[in-house]
Image (spheres, helix red, strand yellow):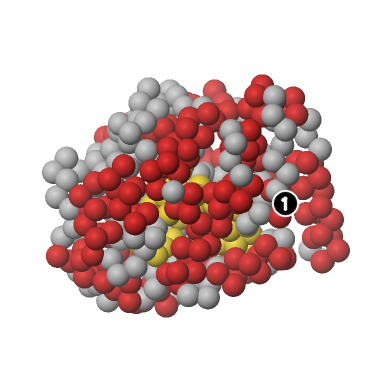
Amino acid sequence: MREMERRQFLKAAAAGLAAMPVAMSGVSAFAGQSRWPGLADAIVINALGGVSDPNKRGQQGRDTMELGERAIKDALASGTTAVNMTIGYVDGPMEPFEYSVQTIARCNDMIKRNPEYLLKVESVADILAAKQAGKIGIIQGFQNAAMMGDKAERVDIFAGLGVKIIQLTYNIANQIGDGSMAPENRGLSEFGRDVVARLNATNTLVDLSHSGEQTCLDAIRISDGPISITHSGCRALSNVPRNKTDEELRLLADKGGVVGIYFMPFLKEDSFPNTMDVVRHIEHAVNVCGEDHVGIGTDGGTTKIDDMQAFHAMVDKEIASRQAAGISAKGEKMGVVPFVEDLQGPDQFQKIADILYANGHSSARIEKILGKNFVRLMSDVWGA
């Protein structure tokens, strides 16, 4: 697409969101508050998410790197500046190392095929460049470190390939430590300590989102620098293993880290949260950690589901499969979709900002939560 056409596309996408009547803006409408005016200028970091159309999920699969016009338009209209996109091995029968290398190549190819919209993020300068150009920065990240095998030095390989964020475990245990669904809660292994040391040495941001409580505490304590929890919630408000205790959150903040609050069913123990629950978790995290240590990691995209009934049926089938494989997290159950249903669509960040603004949070604090805190953390870990 030529530069003039690209600018017209971006302008139309933004104008469509700005012109949306208040009556269509979900929570903002029934709360009766005015819109927060700063989204267009804010840096918005989705600390875990993607640019995809969930309506194609059944046809393309979870690891798709094929972008459609609707997904791109929605992501641009949402104000997203950069997103930590999951690549690499998460779970399944694939050989973890080989599969992870393959997905890095696929992601690089996706970015190269869409230069008018996407930019690979390897530094904070790239995030700022994405904002300036009206593009979406793609941060390559792993949600499992199983691909390290028994060689901690593999961290150096992935860092060299541009992987910027690595989560130590998924829900179950691996050779590095216990995940949130591992009942033993054994913490980091000796090999896990070696992996954290290599992540620190290569300026790779450590992610503890799916880790078990002891693994999380161990990793924060031994890390030479700040650590992230890119997508989680507060266990004080919803006592499920995927959420983090106040002890974990305080220790993370004391070390300079940032927690991203997700838009996931784990925000309520009955698994049917709404937008106000997202705000409750953000506000609790701010109270525990301070305003410099809280952000957003939606664990999803920005395109709305067209046929919720069909999507529910598909997700129920996936949950049954995950439960049978032993990788399902507590809070995943039939009838529950992996997002907050009334927080779908490209105005999701605007809605959150509107409610925070109406609740008395300053524009400076809202800007930190939307992205500045993660930019600061990434600068601390990655350098300029």
Task: Tell me the crowding category of disc 1: few under 14, some 14 to 19, or many 20 or more residues within 10 angstroms, Cα based.
Answer: some
Would you name the residue on which mark 1 appears? Answer: 40
Would you say residue 207 is visible in this rendering? no
Does dot 1 land on a helix, a strand or a loop? helix
Would you say residue 209 is visible in this rendering? yes
Above or below, comparing residue 311 to residue 54 in the picture: above
Query: Disc 1 residue type?
Result: Ala
Q: Residue at x 80, y 60 (%)?
A: 6
Q: Residue at x 20, y 66 (%)?
A: 193
* In-front residue for pair 89/155: 155
Q: Residue at x 42, y 41 (%)?
A: 287
Q: Quadrant of residue 181?
A: top left
- Rendered location of residue 10, percent (x, y): 78, 54
Q: Is residue 149 left or right of residue 320?
A: left
Q: Residue at x 37, y 22 (%)?
A: 270
The N terminus - image quarter: bottom right
- Rendered location of residue 152, percent (x, y): 24, 72
Please tell me how many numbered marks the rendered image carries: 1
* In-front residue for pair 160/373: 373
- Rendered location of residue 317, percent (x, y): 40, 30
* In-front residue for pair 320/337: 337
